[in-house]
Image (tube, helix red, strand yellow):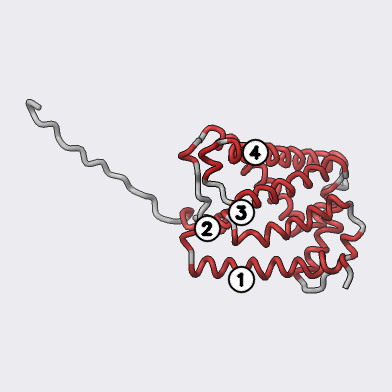
Amino acid sequence: MTLDMLLYGVFPYVCIVVAIVATVYRYTWDKFSYSSLSSQFLESRQLFWGSITWHYGILGVLTAHLVGFLIPQSILWWNMEPIRLYILETTGFILGLMALGGLIVLVMRRFTNTRIRAVTSPMDATLLLVLLIQVVSGVWTAMFFRWGSSWYSAFAVPYLWSILELRPDITLVNNLPTMVQLHILNAFVIILLLPFTRLVHFLSIPIGYIWRPHQVVRWNRRKRVVGS
């Protein structure tokens, strides 16, 4: 077995299987641990700016990746017009910078604030490092390898689909730049670490709040007693 087959043909399945089994086990036996373990009460201003920038940036990037994954041909059609290609690439780059800036603020906050550093576990540090590698490699790719949305749709997406179809085609990633290969491998590392970190809290998004009945609040004020 070659190193490429091990990295791109075997390792992804190890990550996916471990993530599924560990997530199910954690939800079944320790469901109350599905939390981000907020440290907002320790310090809020820096958390606000870092968290807001990070979440808006990364959600935009992930949405773009998901759209490209589901309808790659539509992305290639969109990019046929230069102005549309420029708009898409610029938007993605700005979102990536937002995510990177927010993440840097959160990392600095985590390790420069004494009280927050005291409640930071080794897994927290590992997660931040892996996320930082992922965002930096993504921004690096956007800066130095143009038209990433096109080759993502043409090469990375077919490779990911080949993984899901249980017939991994590693030839699709063999010729990609090293930084892009790192970006792909690190994404599977994130999947592997997901059930063992606080990142798992995104699986407990309270979707039920969308259709639950409105909460009615009534105020019961005591009448003022004359002479009091």
Disc number placed over residue 123 in the picture, else none: 3
Question: Which residue type carries mark 4?
Answer: Gly
Q: Hey, which quadrant is residue 163 in on the image?
A: bottom right
Q: Are marks 3 and 2 in contact (CB under 8 Å)?
A: no
Q: What element carries label 2?
A: helix
Distance from the alpha carbon under mark 3 to that under mark 4: 20 Å
Residue at numbered disc 2:
204
Task: Give how far apart the Cα atoms at labels 2 and 1 are.
Answer: 17 Å
- Residue type highlighted by circle 1: Val
Instruction: Check the image and name the residue furthest to the right.
Output: 175
Q: Residue at x 73, y 56 (%)?
A: 187
Q: Mark 1 sits on what residue?
A: 21
Q: In this view, does 170 lie above or below 74?
A: below
Upstream in sequence: badge 1 or badge 3: 1
Select label 3 or label 4 by which is in front.
3
Q: Please state the horizontal and vertical placement of residue 144, each as a whole percent of the image.
A: 87, 41
**Residue placed under numbered mark 4 in the picture:** 102
Q: Where's residue 90, x and y in %?
A: 79, 38
Cα separation, mark 4 vs mark 1, equals 31 Å
Depth check: 24 or 116 in front?
116
- Local packing at callout 2 (Cα closer than 10 Å; few below 14, some 14-19, many 20+) is few
Q: In this view, does 191 lie above or below 88?
A: below
Count of residue discs: 4
Q: Quadrant of the C terminus?
A: top left
